[in-house]
Amino acid sequence: MEDQPITPHATPIVDGEGNLTYIGDDGRRYVVGLPSDLDDFSVDRVMELLRSGSDLFQRIELLCQRWIDQVSGPELDSRAALVLLLTTLETALEPSDRDPAAQEEKEEEEGEEPPAADSD
């Protein structure tokens, strides 16, 4: 059976054990992995940022569902539409090649040397 993406049903919270968790739309609890080097202040800041974006995330989720409903049909089932949406969003939201920091990071990952700056 293929893994289905799980949509958060509620904003993530820090549970009694200090884990960042959320309840999925399937009713199950999920633990989100945060880098182990985050201190309590950083985790609290991440939580604050996630909470501040929850309304916007819910609107995005609704728009995505409306798009899937609109394009799904006999030729494109809803699962295929979801995969298309997610891969398109992933591509569209990758750091832009115009962003120098993102370009340097990409080149480092690919093992390329960044272009030399012109000294004219």
Image (cartoon, grey):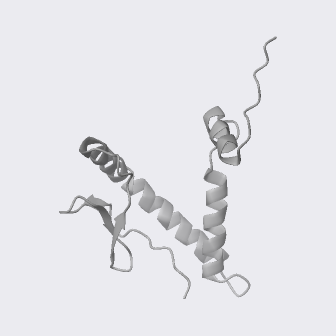
* Residue 42 on image: x %, y %: 31, 43
Q: Relative to residue 13, is residue 89 drawn left or right?
A: right
Quarter of the picture holding the N terminus: bottom right
Q: Is residue 117 above or below residue 38?
A: above
* Residue 5 on image: x %, y %: 50, 74
Q: Is residue 30 above or below residue 101?
A: below
Name which residue lies at 66% across and 44% down: 106
Q: Relative to residue 10, is residue 40 drawn left or right?
A: left
**Which residue is at the front of the view, 92 or 56?**
92
**Which residue is at the front of the view, 10 or 117?**
117
**Which residue is at the front of the view, 61 or 4?**
4
Q: Residue furthest front?
A: 111
Name which residue lies at 37% across and 62% down: 32
Q: Is residue 116 above or below residue 76?
A: above
Name which residue lies at 61% across and 51% down: 93
Q: Residue furthest right?
A: 120
Q: Residue furthest top?
A: 120
Tell me which corner region of the image, top left, top right, bottom left or bottom right, holds residue 28. Answer: bottom left
Q: Is residue 85 above or below residue 73?
A: above
* Residue 118 on image: x %, y %: 79, 18
Q: How many marks?
A: 0
Quarter of the picture holding the C terminus: top right
**Which residue is at the front of the view, 63 or 106?**
106
